[in-house]
Amino acid sequence: MILLDPKNLDRAYPDERSAEIMRKTVEFFEAKGKQALLEDYYDRPWYAEFLEFVRKERIFASMCTPAGEGAPDVRWDTWRNCEFAEILGFYGLQYWYTWQVSVLGLGPIWMSENESLRRRAAKALEDGGIFAFGLSEKTHGADIYSTDMVLTRDGDGWRANGRKYYIGNGNEAAIVSTFGRFEDGDEYVFFAADSNHPNYHLVQNVVASQNYVSEFELRDYPVRKEDILHRGREAWNAALNTVNIGKYNLGWASIGIATHALYEAIAHANNRVLYGMRVTEMSHVRRMFVEGHARLVAMKLFALRAADYMRAASSSDRRYLLYNPMVKMKTTTQGEAVINLFWDAIAAKGFEKNMYFSQAAVDIRALPKLEGTVHVNIALIAKFMPNYFFNPAEYPEIPRQDHGRNDDFLFDQGSARGLGQIQFHDYRKALEAVDLPNVRIFAEQCESFRQMLQEAPPGPDQMKDVDFLIAGGEIFALVVYAQLILENARIYGLDDDLLDQIFEFMVRDVSEHALQLFGQPSSNETQIARCREMMRKPEHDADRYERVWKRHVEPLDGAYTMNP
């Protein structure tokens, strides 16, 4: 089974330490129990107990320290980071969040040539420390062009003044990697701030949560040369390249949340009898579970395959820069769709305070809105469309990247420029390799979209029309999503029934976005004609549908229950 079952961890690791981290993390939450987990969620205490576990077992130290920067057993390994993020999301977004913002805070440090700060970070991790990423500001959000954190010359160093907003872990971070600019010349800078310094003023927690999402102010905060992580263009690159690493993790939080919600929802619905029948015997409820399960499996297949490209990346293969924002954007919005389907199936049960589902239904909404909104990421991936559709390149095939090694390139990504020059392998090969009814229909939809781009690409006014770009970008995202799902379906041996079930909803989704593009005020006649071609009905096979229910969905009833 491709979905996570915490009580039957079966992912293969080349070393015992990785498996031990996953096992002990699950044991921590299962020992805590569901009731205590939910009480903490609603009472909102700081998760000191979890962070003490992390310190005692050296979890963040092992996972978040690159090889060569600390103890012999440390490495930054995206293969194991995926499952760790999934497990944390499975038990609660709050636990994932303190790890996620530590990942972001560490990015500029591990990318820096400042050896003393790297040593300081490695020691803090061994001591159980957490980290923060001081990028966004209340007035400007993540518009880093407009930062108001200003460093003014003071002798051999500087004084920093300014506020940061929405900074996770800002209350207890060992190091806050803080983005700003020098007053003289407006040169960008990343520097290390200490949350315990008297000139570091914690203003508030801006959310009602176990997380501490801080607003803080630096008032004449002294910055020495040895506190500087990056200057100039390198500071800019560190900001964007850190987000390249961190935004990927949002998809795994969604996958973990939706998986736990599925176990609860199917156990409730499949054992509830209304009007003389099981709720799951009602056709609309069964459809919700079959479709929700298919969407969830697709999410995981895509995110796993994106990790392969991230781990195999190099200066000559930067395809991950399309796939990573896709995990952030597409996987997280699919997580919302999955929760919506299950919630419609279990209805009022999803509000009850003794259900994990009640927190899942709230927290799943956050992920598409963090690390850049869906709209921002669609605008980003639109830069890749010309080369993706019309200028493919040949690359060696990338196998599953499950080996235990440090992902060196993530901290040596180089310039954040040149996205429009990145080439991709031909997506049509993945579609042509699979002979299933709905994959064939989907391939025809993709060709109609490609023809539309060739015959009637967006004009100058349409390129400024965000609604138009979003509608077209959603179709592009589905093509990319399908390509990696198909590649990974082969690698993981997904059966044809489930794969065709996945493409049944994919055909519908293309049709939905084609209708949105069709209805845009600025759509021209050629674009409208191609949109009509893209609006297709998927092929429904009742026997295949029943097999998917019997083999893949119904057996999840009782497959996992959290300790009380």
Image (cartoon, helix red, strand yellow):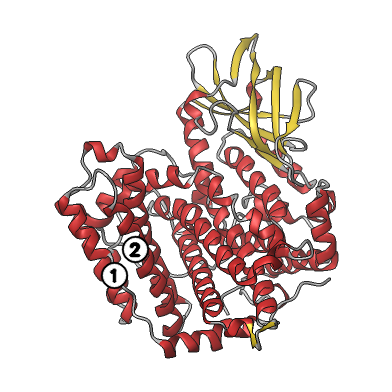
In the picture of the structure, the residue carrying the numbered disc 1 is: 536
Query: Does residue 192 sit above or below 494 in this rendering?
Result: above
Q: Where is residue 136? Give x, y as percent.
A: 58, 32
- Where is residue 265? Give x, y as percent: 66, 73
Q: Is residue 345 above or below residue 92?
A: below
From the viewer's perspective, tell me whether residue 276 is left or right of residue 145: right
Q: Could you say whether the residue bearing mark 2 is in a helix, strand or loop?
A: helix
In the image, residue 150 lies at what x, y percent? Answer: 59, 18
CB contact under 8 Å: marks 2 and 1? yes
Residue 3, relative to residue 193: is it above or below?
Answer: below
Which residue is found at the position 39% from the left and 68% from the top? Answer: 506
User: How many neighbours does mark 2 have within 10 angstroms: few (below 14), some (14-19), or many (20 or more)?
Assistant: many
The reply, left or right, for residue 227 in relation to residue 446 is right
Most foreground residue, 379 or 414: 379
In primary-sequence order, the first of circles 2 and 1 is 2
Would residue 542 be visible to someone looking at this image?
yes
Q: Is residue 447 visible?
A: no
Q: CA distance from mark 2 to mark 1?
A: 8 Å
Q: Which mark is residue 510?
A: 2
Q: Residue type at mark 1?
A: Arg
SS label for mark 1: loop
Kind of residue at disc 2: Val
